[in-house]
Amino acid sequence: MALNLKSLLFVSLFIALMVTPIAEAQLGLVSGLLGLIRIQGTLFCTSNGNIGVNGTSTPVFPNALVQLQCGAGNVVSSATTNGSGVFSIVLDPLQVILSSLLANCNLVVNTPLSSCNSTLPSVGVLQSSLQFIGNTLLGLLNVVNIGPSGFLFQA
Ligand SMILES: *[C@@H]1O[C@H](CO)[C@@H](O)[C@H](O)[C@H]1NC(C)=O
Ligand SMILES: *[C@@H]1O[C@H](CO)[C@@H](O)[C@H](O)[C@H]1NC(C)=O
Ligand SMILES: *[C@@H]1O[C@H](CO)[C@@H](O)[C@H](O)[C@H]1NC(C)=O
């Protein structure tokens, strides 16, 4: 009996030690215990990638490779825009600190604009910093929504 209690205590302590680093990692989050970070936006087929004066009738930029670059240009993740020009990059909050994501990372599009409209440039990149949009609940998951602050064309 005494031996069983001892081993039970040992196992509990072991579990507590295993779980602690995960709890600490989550302190860097605005989300709860279960969550993910979603970077989503729409890329438009215009000279700067943003929505034009004609609003929703602005043509979109499908099949463009959108990279998430952090620090000195490290590609952390990427996604391709779909037929509606929408890209979506999902990140695990245990591996990314939200504040450093917003401060150090950019969205970069290397796919030339000429691939959606031949009169647009065939060299240069579109680039945007990131902004926090808000949190939404997806069942038990807290989704931290991030979007582009606005793309700029860089020759
Ligand atoms: C906006 O829409 C109008 C009417 O359809 C069109 O004449 C004009 O060229 C459009 N402007 C741009 C920048 O797409
Ligand atoms: C593109 O993705 C968005 C967001 O998931 C979705 O609402 C839209 O229907 C998709 N469009 C196409 C053409 O698949
Ligand atoms: C292609 O881009 C040019 C220059 O921005 C624009 O005038 C034209 O309307 C665009 N064509 C289409 C099909 O979007």
Image (spheres, rainbow, N blue to C red):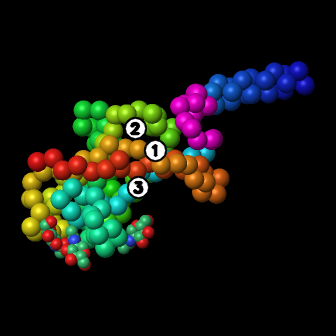
Graded by Cα atoms within 10 Å as few (under 14), some (14 to 19) or many (20 or more), the crowding at tag 1 reads some
Q: Secondary structure at mark 2?
A: helix
Q: Amino acid at mark 3?
A: Gln
What residue do we see at 55% from left, 49% from top?
Answer: 135
- The region drawn magenta spans 21-33
Asked if disc 1 and disc 2 are in contact, CB closer than 8 Å, the reply is yes
Residue farthest toward the right in the current orientation of the protein:
1
Is 107 covered by the magenta stretch? no
Q: Which mark is residue 40?
A: 3
Report the front residue among 22 and 151. Answer: 151
What residue do we see at 74% from left, 27% from top?
Answer: 12
User: Going from the N terminus, do you reach mark 3 or mark 1 first?
Assistant: 3
Mark 1–mark 2 Cα distance, whole angstroms, equals: 8 Å
Is 22 covered by the magenta stretch? yes
Graded by Cα atoms within 10 Å as few (under 14), some (14 to 19) or many (20 or more), the crowding at tag 3 reads some
Q: Can residue 77 be spotted in the picture?
A: no
Mark 3–mark 2 Cα distance, whole angstroms, equals: 14 Å
Image quarter for ligand 2: bottom left
Whether the residue under disc 3 has CB within 8 Å of ligand 2: yes
In screen coordinates, is 14 left or right of 62? right
Name the residue carrying label 1. Answer: 132
User: Going from the N terminus, do you reach mark 3 or mark 2 first?
Assistant: 3
